[in-house]
Image (cartoon, helix red, strand yellow):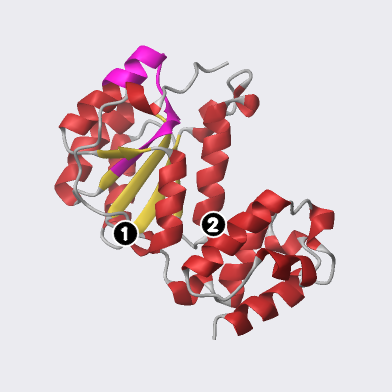
C-alpha cells in the first residue's frame, strides 16, 4: 500500500509563473505498469487522482503519453517531439531515476513543466515532500489534481466544451465510462449520473456560456436529448 499523499500545506509553494492552458498541455503518465503491481494501489488516493486527471484529459482531448521503461534516450526523444506541439508537459505517476534524469533536458526544451503533486509516487512521504521542494526551487510547476482539472476546465476552448463531442465526453467522464458504452436514448441516471455529477456539468457548461440549470438535466435526461439542449442553450 503506498504512503498517504502529503497535504498541500506540507509542500513548498510553486515558484512557476506560467498559466496552464488546455490546448498547450500534454499529460505524461510515468510507470503505470509498475504502479498497478503495488498491493492496495487500487484503493489509494494516488490511483483515484491518476484516474481523475486521465479522465479529464480524455474529456478535453488532451494528449496522453504513457512513458514506461528505462530507455533514457527513447524517453527524451519521445517527450521532445511532444514538446514541440504541446509545450506544457504535465507529469504524474512514478517518479523514477530515469524521469529525474530527463527533467533537466526537458527544461532546455520548454520551461512549462508541471508535476501533479498528489498523483506521483516516490519511495516514501519524506522523499515526496523533499522532491517537490527541490523541483519548485528549480522553477518546475506543481499543483494538485483538483487544481489541475479545474484550470483545464476553465482554459478549455468554449467551442470545444460546448460541441457535440465535448458534451458527450464530459458526461462520459462523470460516469467513468467510454462514450460508446452509453446508450444515447437511456436515462443517464441508470448509468449512475448523480446530483454531484450534474452540478459539476452545469458549472462547466455555464462557465463556457451555456444557459443551463440543474433542473434542465432532470428534464433532458438522456445523452441525445441533453446534447441537443446544451447546444441550443449555447447559441
Judging depth in this view, the residue of 76 and 179 nearest the camera is: 179
Total tally of numbered discs in the picture: 2
Q: Residue 141: where, in percent of width, then height? A: 26, 40
Instruction: Give the Cα distance between marks 2 and 1.
Output: 15 Å
Q: Earlier in the sequence, mark 2 or mark 1?
A: 2
139 horizontally vs 202: left or right: left
Judging depth in this view, the residue of 73 and 210 nearest the camera is: 210
Q: Residue 92: where, in percent of width, then height? A: 42, 37
Confirm whether residue 104 shows in the render.
yes
| Residue 86 - label | 1
4 horizontally vs 11: left or right: right
Q: Verify whether residue 116 appears in magenta.
A: yes
Q: Is residue 190 above or below residue 219?
A: above
Contact, mark 2 vs mark 1 (Cβ under 8 Å): no
Q: Verify whether residue 51 appears in magenta.
A: no
* Circle 2 SS class: helix
- Which image quarter: residue 44? top right
Residues packed near mark 2 inside 10 Å, few (<14), some (14 to 19) or many (20 plus)? some
183 horizontally vs 69: left or right: right
Q: Is residue 224 above or below residue 177?
A: below
* Circle 1 SS class: loop
Judging depth in this view, the residue of 91 and 211 nearest the camera is: 211
**Region in magenta:** 114-130
Q: Residue at x 49, y 73 (%)?
A: 160
Q: Residue 72: where, in percent of width, then height? A: 30, 35
Q: Residue at x 61, y 69 (%)?
A: 167
Give the quadrant of the N terminus: top right
| Residue 58 - label | 2
Confirm whether residue 96 shows in the render.
no
Q: Residue at x 62, y 84 (%)?
A: 232
Give the quadrant of the C terminus: bottom right
Amino acid at each position: 500500500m503506498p504512503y498517504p499523499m502529503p497535504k498541500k500545506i506540507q509542500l513548498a509553494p510553486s515558484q512557476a509563473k506560467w498559466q496552464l492552458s488546455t490546448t498547450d498541455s500534454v499529460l505524461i503518465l510515468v510507470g503505470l505498469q509498475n504502479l498497478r503491481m503495488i498491493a492496495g494501489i487500487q484503493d489509494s488516493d494516488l490511483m483515484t487522482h491518476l484516474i481523475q486527471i486521465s479522465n479529464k484529459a480524455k474529456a478535453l482531448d488532451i494528449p496522453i503519453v504513457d512513458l514506461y521503461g528505462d530507455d533514457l534516450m527513447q524517453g527524451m526523444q519521445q517527450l521532445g517531439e511532444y514538446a514541440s506541439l504541446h509545450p506544457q508537459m504535465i507529469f504524474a505517476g512514478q517518479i523514477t531515476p530515469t524521469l529525474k534524469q530527463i527533467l533537466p533536458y526537458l527544461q532546455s526544451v520548454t520551461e512549462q513543466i508541471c508535476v501533479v503533486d498528489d498523483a506521483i509516487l516516490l519511495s516514501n512521504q519524506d522523499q515526496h515532500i523533499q522532491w517537490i521542494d527541490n523541483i519548485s526551487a528549480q522553477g518546475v510547476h506543481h499543483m494538485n489534481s483538483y487544481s489541475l482539472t479545474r484550470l483545464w476546465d476553465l482554459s478549455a476552448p468554449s467551442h470545444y466544451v460546448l460541441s457535440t463531442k465535448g458534451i458527450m465526453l464530459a458526461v462520459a467522464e462523470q460516469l467513468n465510462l467510454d462514450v460508446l458504452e452509453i446508450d444515447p436514448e437511456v436515462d443517464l441516471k441508470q448509468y449512475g449520473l448523480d446530483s454531484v455529477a450534474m452540478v459539476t456539468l452545469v458549472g462547466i457548461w455555464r462557465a463556457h456560456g451555456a444557459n443551463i440549470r440543474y433542473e434542465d438535466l432532470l428534464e433532458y435526461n438522456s445523452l441525445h436529448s441533453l446534447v441537443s439542449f446544451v447546444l441550443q442553450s449555447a447559441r
